Image: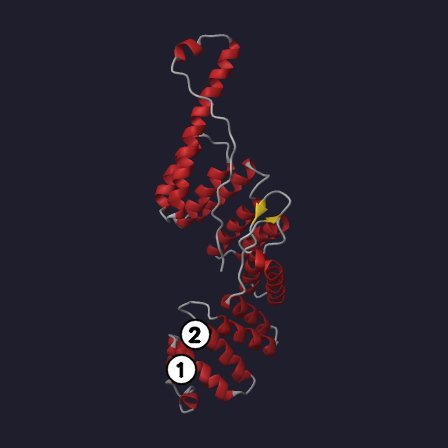
Amino acid sequence: MKTKNLYSFFLSFLVIPFSANLGIIFFTLSSDIALFKQEVKATNWNAYKLNFDNGYRMLNKGEYQKALEYFNKAIKNYSHEGAAYYNRGNAYSGLGKSKEAIKDYLKSMELDSERGNQYAYNNIALEYEGLGDYKNAIKYINLAIKAYPEDCLYFENRGWYNLELENYKQAENDYKKAGELYLKYKNRQRMYVDCPKIKTLVHCQMDSDYYNELGIAQENLGDLQGALLNYNKAIEANYPTEEKYIYYYNRGYIAEELEDYEGACKDYKVAATLGDEETNEWLNTKDGEWCKKM
């Protein structure tokens, strides 16, 4: 559900050929010295671009250590481009080094405040999520939403953080907003949409996880019918996951609360069949005996 943005800034630059006669260039007039500096910069830039491209390819292949090595070289070649820090942050993230990743995402925004801030904010939020720090995750996902309030993914992620903090009403509102934005842009999932600073993608899905998490929020708010409706949708969406049993267990629990014991028992048994070990054990206890006999 929660995705990390892997992207490359598109950069335009002028490549100035490096002179073979360094001695002559070095000892000419000051105007020629300036030209020499430009040529050195261009050479560094070429090396930067080569290492950046290699790092980006390794990143997309999931070879994070190799990607990190290339981005380190790119930054050593030319340390003034936010894209290298951003993607090195992604490499650190892939290696499970959240603190280093956060540091690089922040550096990328410092160097390139006009592009990509929402992606960096979202990725920082994901790192804090991984650290179990949902308050800071909300802080940065709020900044992502402020930077680009049309991406349903950011609202969906914030909904999850609010669930973890037991802010159920806020979670429900976030999931509903994510759903509204998804429906607004669902026919443009692979198309670019306008935003103030850059062109970006609206990317989220109203999949089984989405409906399940909205259902959890509503269940905790006492809206059992609303929760039941969304657990039904979670099952109907048929999202490919090894933990599909969760959707059946949750629906079974609501059915039991609504005194539909036959429906509850049916869902509990399906959950057990799909790999829910706890429910399977419960069915074999005295407490679950009523269901097992149905």
Estimate the x, y position of residue 254 in percent, counting from the top left.
Answer: 54, 80
The residue labelled by disc 1 is 282
* Element marked by disc 2: helix
Q: Position of residue 23 (x, y in %)?
A: 40, 10
Name the disc covering residue 33, or none.
none
Question: Tag on residue 245?
Answer: 2
The amino acid type, in three-letter code, at marker 2 is: Tyr
Quarter of the image holding residue 227? bottom right
Q: How many marks?
A: 2
- In the image, is 258 to the left or to the right of 48? right
In three-dimensional space, the C-alpha distance between marks 2 and 1, rounded to whole angstroms, equals 14 Å
Local SS, label 1: helix
| Pick the front one: 156 or 20 | 20
Which residue corresponds to the image point at 52% horizontal and 70% vertical from the top-left? 212
Labelled pair 2, 1 in contact (Cβ < 8 Å): no
- Image quarter (top left, top right, bottom left or bottom right) of the C terminus: bottom left
237 w.r.t. 293: above or below: above
Colour mapping used in the image: secondary structure
Q: Closer to the camera: disc 2 or disc 1? A: 2
Q: Earlier in the sequence, mark 2 or mark 1?
A: 2
Mark 1: amino acid: Trp
Residue 164 percent location from the top left of the image: 53, 63
Q: Callout 2: few (<14), some (14-19), or many (20+) C-alpha neighbours within 10 Å?
A: many
The 10 Å Cα crowd at callout 1, few under 14, some 14 to 19, many 20 or more, is: some
- Percent coordinates x, y for residue 96 in the rendering: 40, 50
5 vs 52: above or below: below
